[in-house]
């Protein structure tokens, strides 16, 4: 084999040292034909296969494979031949070779028929265009590894990107991501490009015509921007945000971010997006932050109020004081409940309302068939039915986590007022959680038990004392008033108060 080193030796011997063919052949132990090849070009010749390699087992079936692959073009996309199916067809026709051989030949035929994709380089005007997409990432949330859905919006001119995590790709999360992105960018792009996602598109019609979701149309009308939907399966039409999905996952989520809540996680992601302003994208004349400073004044202004990103449903109260949404049940205060209520489902919260306003708020549950109870919602009912205290599910859940001093108070009250009144007094104390934080109430109960005033009035008094402690009064300095020093040192005569007793003067 003629190596590049041997080729250089031959060329140098002939052109520089001016040796003859015979001398070169003798010294380097090569043939005249090899010398001729080396002198023809300094570049090594590329290997060319002049005759096909023998394929004694697969060879008789190669034309059959090509015919079946050509037939694929006439079949529906989801009913075409796979490499494995081709292997089973050939086996039935007598093929005895390995499946891997068939797969390799199928890959060669497909690669030869595939044309390279060529894309147009695009250029955008500042403030005009943005792109939106969803992605996934793994994070550590509440100590467990969770896969979150990541919303991304990217300004096409400055390349500034906003990233926000949600538990699911719901329509309300999709709209809430827009609202947060607009606030992050300081304005609204004139046009946003999307995939044909269900949160926005109800049905794909001919060409670029879409039947859109009504809620999405209302949202777009609120912010007054235009939308553009890519052709199905043509993600390259919004390639900027497609690449941003991978970039944000590699740079913001490696290693996995650790957070106790979605609020903490999204604060971290927003900080990462802001820090990315210092980066200069390859091929761009300036960093992202400087380009965004030019783009921001050209964005549409934000409306006076943000869009309310929620799903609104009319719900009916069940016999247990709960309403249902998306297979989950949420409790409602027993003293404010009505038969028919309005439920608003936000990405992270469920709000239940009457005509007078909101009466219940819960963290939104994305499980199935779960019951989310607030024990404060059932206290009025328990005050009327103290015998159910030990069996009420909301209180049993609460008792598993409340401070031990609560059990001491309950036992004390039941001993003082057995057969119901003690539990009723205890429930009235628990109602203080509607006004004050739990840590303050636990401290007040501890002081009330220590000072032998463990009842509603005593606990309330200690809450007031803890919130508004009496300031210490410093002693009066009478150094400059010697005539008053003896008066200040005289202790008061407490027997004077005996005059107020019966028989006193």
Image (cartoon, rainbow, N blue to C red):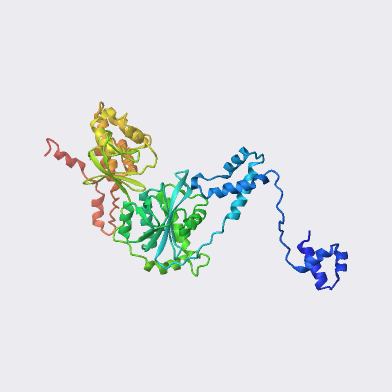
x and y percent of residue 446 in the render? 33, 38
Q: Residue at x 48, y 67 (%)?
A: 287
Q: Residue at x 61, y 46 (%)?
A: 64
Give the side of residue 292 with respect to residue 100, left or right.
left
Tell me which corner region of the image, top left, top right, bottom left or bottom right, holds residue 408: top left
Instruction: Please name whichever residue, 155 or 120, is drawn nearer the observer in this view of the structure.
Output: 120
Whether residue 453 is visible to the viewer of this picture, yes or no, is no
Instruction: Please name whichever residue, 154 or 491, is drawn nearer the observer in this view of the structure.
Output: 154
Position of 409 relative to 285 (above/below)? above
Q: Residue at x 47, y 53 (%)?
A: 233
Q: Residue at x 28, y 51 (%)?
A: 473
Number of marks in the rendered image: 0
Check the picture and name the quadrant holding the N terminus.
bottom right
Check the picture and name the quadrant holding the C terminus.
top left
x and y percent of residue 170 in the render? 38, 48
Give the side of residue 276 with respect to residue 187, left or right.
right
Instruction: Please name whichever residue, 49 or 178, is drawn nearer the observer in this view of the structure.
Output: 49
x and y percent of residue 142 in the render? 44, 44
Whether residue 233 is visible to the viewer of this picture, yes or no, is yes
Give the side of residue 38 with respect to residue 335, left or right.
right
Position of 411 relative to 126 (above/below)? above
Tell me which corner region of the image, top left, top right, bottom left or bottom right, holds residue 342: top left
x and y percent of residue 26 in the render? 88, 65
Give the side of residue 85 with respect to residue 496, left or right.
right
């Amino acid at each position: 084999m003629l190596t590049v080193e041997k080729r250089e030796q031959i060329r140098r011997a002939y052109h520089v040292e001016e040796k003859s063919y015979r001398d070169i052949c003798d010294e380097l132990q090569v043939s005249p034909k090899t010398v001729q090849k080396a002198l023809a070009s300094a570049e090594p010749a590329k290997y060319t296969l002049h005759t096909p390699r023998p394929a004694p087992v697969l060879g008789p079936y190669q034309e059959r494979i090509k015919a079946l692959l050509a037939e694929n073009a006439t079949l529906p996309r989801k009913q075409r031949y796979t490499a494995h199916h081709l292997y089973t067809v050939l086996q039935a026709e007598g093929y005895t070779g390995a499946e891997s051989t068939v797969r390799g030949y199928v890959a060669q035929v497909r690669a030869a028929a595939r044309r390279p994709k060529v894309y147009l380089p695009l250029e955008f005007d500042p403030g005009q265009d943005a792109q939106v997409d969803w992605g996934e990432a793994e994070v550590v949330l509440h100590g467990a590894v969770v896969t979150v859905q990541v919303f991304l919006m990217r300004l096409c001119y400055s390349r500034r990107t906003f990233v926000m995590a949600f538990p699911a790709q719901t329509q309300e999360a999709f709209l809430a991501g827009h609202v947060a992105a607009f606030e992050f960018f300081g304005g609204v792009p004139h046009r946003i490009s999307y995939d044909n996602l269900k949160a926005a598109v109800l049905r794909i019609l001919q060409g670029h015509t879409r039947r859109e979701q009504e809620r999405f149309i209302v949202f777009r009308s609120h912010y007054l921007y235009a939308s553009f939907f890519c052709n199905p399966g043509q993600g390259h039409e919004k390639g900027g945000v497609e690449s941003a999905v991978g970039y944000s996952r590699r740079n913001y989520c490696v290693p996995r971010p650790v957070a106790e809540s979605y609020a903490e996680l999204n604060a971290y992601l927003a900080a990462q997006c802001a820090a990315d302003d210092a980066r200069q994208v390859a091929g761009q004349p300036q960093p992202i932050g400087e380009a965004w400073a030019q783009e921001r004044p050209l964005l549409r202004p934000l409306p006076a109020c943000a869009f309310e990103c929620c799903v609104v449903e009319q719900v009916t109260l069940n016999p247990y004081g709960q309403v249902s949404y998306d297979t989950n049940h949420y409790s409602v205060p027993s003293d404010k409940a009505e038969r028919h209520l309005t439920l608003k489902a936000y990405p992270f919260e469920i709000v239940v309302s009457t005509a007078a306003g909101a009466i219940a708020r819960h963290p939104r549950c994305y499980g199935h068939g779960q019951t989310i109870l607030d024990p404060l919602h059932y206290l009025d009912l328990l005050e009327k039915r103290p015998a159910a205290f030990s069996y009420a599910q909301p209180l049993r859940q609460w008792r598993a986590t409340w401070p031990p001093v609560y059990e001491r108070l309950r036992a004390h009250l039941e001993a003082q007022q057995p057969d119901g009144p003690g539990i009723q007094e205890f429930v009235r104390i628990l109602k203080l959680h509607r006004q004050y934080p739990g840590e303050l109430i636990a401290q007040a109960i501890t002081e009330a038990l220590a000072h032998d005033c463990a009842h509603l009035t005593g606990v309330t008094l200690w809450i007031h004392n803890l919130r508004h402690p009496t300031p210490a009064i410093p002693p009066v300095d009478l150094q400059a008033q010697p005539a008053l020093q003896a008066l200040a040192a005289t202790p008061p005569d407490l027997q004077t108060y005996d005059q107020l007793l019966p028989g006193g003067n």
